[in-house]
Image (cartoon, rainbow, N blue to C red):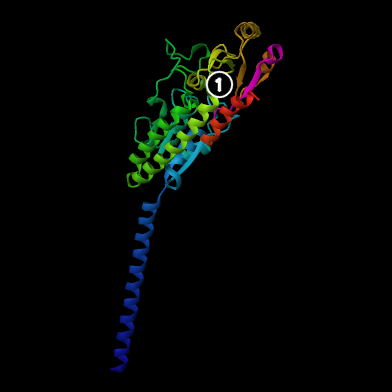
Amino acid sequence: MQHINFSKNKTKTILSKNIFFNYLVFFILIYISLSSFIYAKVNIVVSYGYIESIVKEIGKDKVDVFSISSSRYQDPHYVVPKPSYVVKLSKADLLIINGASLEIGFIPVLIKQANNPKINPGNIGYLELSNYFDLIDKPKLLSRDLGDIHPEGNPHFYLDPYNIIPIANIIYLKLSEIDKTNQSFYEKNFENFKQNFSTKLSEWDKKMENFKGVKVFQYHSLYDYFLRRYGIELVANLEPKPGIPPTPKYIENLLEIAKNEKVFFILQDYYHKDNYSKYISSKTNLKILYLPHDDQNIYKLFDEIVNAFYNSKN
Ligand SMILES: [Zn+2]
């Protein structure tokens, strides 16, 4: 009898150990799935460094951001699509692009290959910033004929620093829509960003106030919004049309204009060759200002542009 009792107790112990183990596994699995749900970051792909910077300001540790292009040496109109970008897009919850055809050479093909319905145009995970802005220089005919790479108007609207807080606002609202549980977190970050960026706007306004009426050339129509903001007069682009390099005859004409109009500066980006700017400068003594068009730090982007002007006086 004693032996039987012993056996029964042993069986009972093994059974309860099994039940305990099963419960443990069950709770661990629940914990893992809940925590991955609660702590999962929003996967975001953006086209340019400036968007990445703003997304990080608003999303902080709740988002993972990958920028397709972020270098000042990369032509924003012509980015080569890579398989690694397709992989990133296939896992994305959100795609944010500049829009107005700036990415037409690479984003549509990447979206197609990624085969991720979430980020298709018109769906919740697709955000095109240009839809919220009035673009300047809209051509009368919508066409990319004759090489015009701005068929919907000038897409470089984000280079007006006063458009950055509105962009941050749009991104804050989109993040709150996609990730509702963290809405108050995004809102708080947006309010902080708004305050910090406004302080910088005042600093930049002050540094730029002596440039009203100053006449400039620029290589490509990158800085039109910036120049308009600070009352700087754009006399001509070195490109006769966006995306079309100048002919020798066109350059000779610019030399005449430079003398007659008293042009001060040539604004030169980092991704076009500066040989035309240098030639004009050598013939006219115009100063070349090298300016970035993109950066993974939105403050640094405008600090560099503004300081290039500000330091040119010294
Ligand atoms: Zn352009």
Residue extending furthest right? 282
The reply, left or right, for residue 258 in relation to residue 5 is right
**Position above or below: 31 against 197:** below
- Identify which residue, 265 or 65, lies in the foreground: 265
Where is the N terminus found, in terms of image quarters?
bottom left
Q: Residue at x 29, y 89 (%)?
A: 5
Tell me the quarter of the picture where residue 123 sits. Answer: top left
Within 10 Å of disc 1 (Cα), the crowding (few <14, some 14-19, many 20+) is some
Q: Residue 144 in the image: x percent, y percent? A: 48, 15
Q: Residue at x 65, y 7 (%)?
A: 252
The reply, left or right, for residue 194 in relation to residue 149 is left
- Identify which residue, 211 or 70, lies in the foreground: 211
Q: Residue 134 in the image: x percent, y percent? A: 40, 20
- Residue type at mark 1 is Asn
Q: Which residues are magenta?
A: 281-294
Q: Residue at x 53, y 21 (%)?
A: 223
Residue extending furthest bottom? 1
Q: Note whether residue 89 is visible.
A: no
Q: Secondary structure at mark 1?
A: helix
Q: Note whether residue 13 is visible.
A: yes
Look at the image and say whether residue 286 sits in the magenta stretch: yes
**Position above or below: 179 against 46:** below
- Identify which residue, 139 or 110, lies in the foreground: 139
Q: Which residue is mark 1?
A: 210
Where is the C terminus found, in terms of image quarters?
top right
Q: Residue 181 in the image: x percent, y percent? A: 33, 47
Look at the image and say whether residue 57 sits in the magenta stretch: no
- Identify which residue, 79 or 8, lies in the foreground: 79
Q: Residue at x 31, y 85 (%)?
A: 9
